[in-house]
Image (spheres, grey):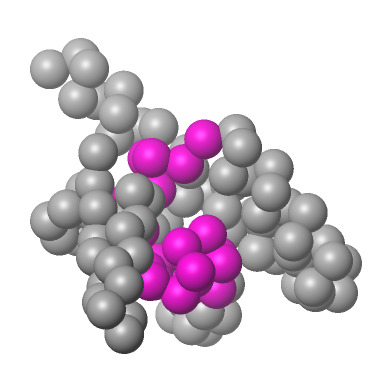
Amino acid sequence: MSKVTQTESSSVVTCPLALVAPLPLTEHPAAVYLSALGLGSRPAMRQALDTIARLLTNNLCDAMTLDWAALRYKHTAALRSVLMEKYAPATANKMLSALRRVLKEALRFIGHKLRL
């Protein structure tokens, strides 16, 4: 699995949801999703994905450093609860929509790699 470490006053924090190495943009689920959007929608959805990544990793990752394919049901269920508590319904739904699309892209890449 992937890990990121961060030293904070002599304690080490690891993040199992972080990418070990950067992915090419053509193989990164968030980058592929964002590139399919119109220019006007990209900043808002990038911000939504950054927020999701930070919530999932205690501010250690953003949309481009999170390993989206490593997310499991427990992550998405907990995230949904947090978003519904913290944000207005329309905002939470927008963020969940972005998450769904990125997870679909991640699944496509996993399926493609399995066929190779």
**Residue 48 location, quadrant:** bottom right
Residue 46 place in picture, x, y as percent: 47, 74
Q: Is residue 21 left or right of residue 35?
A: left
Which residue is at the front of the view, 104 or 81? 81
Residue 15, how many percent across, how many down?
35, 57
Quarter occupied by residue 73:
top right
Q: Is residue 19 left or right of residue 59?
A: left
Name the residue at 55% across, 73% down: 51
Query: How many marks do you count on the picture?
Result: 0
In this picture, is 61 found above or below 72?
below
Magenta stretch containing residue 16, yes or no? no
Farthest front residue in view? 10
- Residue in front for this viewpoint, 49 or 79: 79
Which residues fall within the magenta stretch? 49-72
Residue 71 drawn in magenta: yes
Q: Does any portion of residue 25 appear in the rendered image?
A: yes
For the C terminus, the quadrant is top left
- The residue that appears at 65% across and 64% down in the rendered structure is 95
Q: Could you say where residue 115 lies in the image, as x and y percent from the top left?
A: 20, 14
User: Would you say 14 lies left or right of 79 here?
Assistant: left
Residue at 80%, 74% in the rendered image: 87
Residue 36 vs residue 70, the one in the foreground: 70
- Tell me the residue at 48%/83% (across/down): 43
Above or below 3: residue 51: below
Is residue 113 toward the left or the right of residue 82 in the image?
A: left
Would you say residue 46 is visible in this rendering?
A: no
Q: Position of residue 30 (x, y in %)?
A: 38, 58
